Image: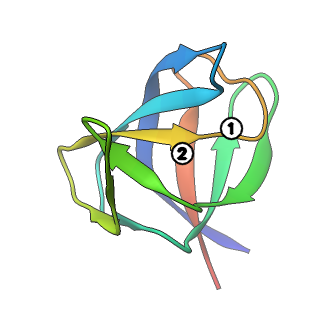
Amino acid sequence: MEKKLVGSVRHYFNKVGVAVIELSSELRVGDRIALEGGNSFEQTVDSMQIEHKSIPVATKGQSIGLKVVNPVREGYQVYKILE
C-alpha cells in the first residue's frame, strides 16, 4: 500500500467529531485516507467543508473540515492511500 502525505490536523472538535485539516496536496471526496498519530485509522472522505459549505475538491493551502470516524489530535498526519 502506497501513501502520500496530504495534510495535518490543526484542530479537532470533539462534540461533532470534525477535524480541521490543513492541506499540503489535493484531496477529493471519495479518496481513501489514513490518519496517523496516537490512534491510527483509515476512512473514506465522504464529504468536506470550507466555511460550512460542502465542496468536492480541496487544494493545497486550504483548510477543510472533515468528519472523522475516530477522535484525533492536533499534529496527526493525513495520508491519501494510493491504489
Whether residue 76 is situated above or below residue 62 in the rendered picture: above
Q: Residue under circle 1?
A: 36
> Residue 51's quadrant in the figure?
top left
Q: What residue is rendered at 62% in x and 17% in y?
A: 73
Q: Which tag, 1 or 2, sits closer to the chain's start?
A: 1
Q: Circle 1 sits in a helix, a strand or a loop, which is it?
A: strand
74 or 12, nearer to the observer: 12
Quarter of the figure with the C terminus: bottom right
User: At label 1, which amino acid type do we have?
Assistant: Glu
Residue 28 seen in the figure: yes
Whether residue 56 is situated above or below residue 73 in the rendered picture: below
Residue 65 at what x, y percent from top left?
A: 42, 37
> Residue 12's quadrant in the figure?
top right
Crowd around label 2: few <14 · some 14–19 · many ≥20 (10 Å): many
Position of residue 29 in the picture relative to residue 41 (left or right): left
User: At label 2, which amino acid type do we have?
Assistant: Val
54 or 68, nearer to the observer: 54
Quarter of the figure with the N terminus: bottom right
> Residue 76's quadrant in the figure?
top right
Q: Residue under circle 2?
A: 78
Mark 1 and mark 2 in contact? Answer it, CB < 8 Å.
Answer: yes
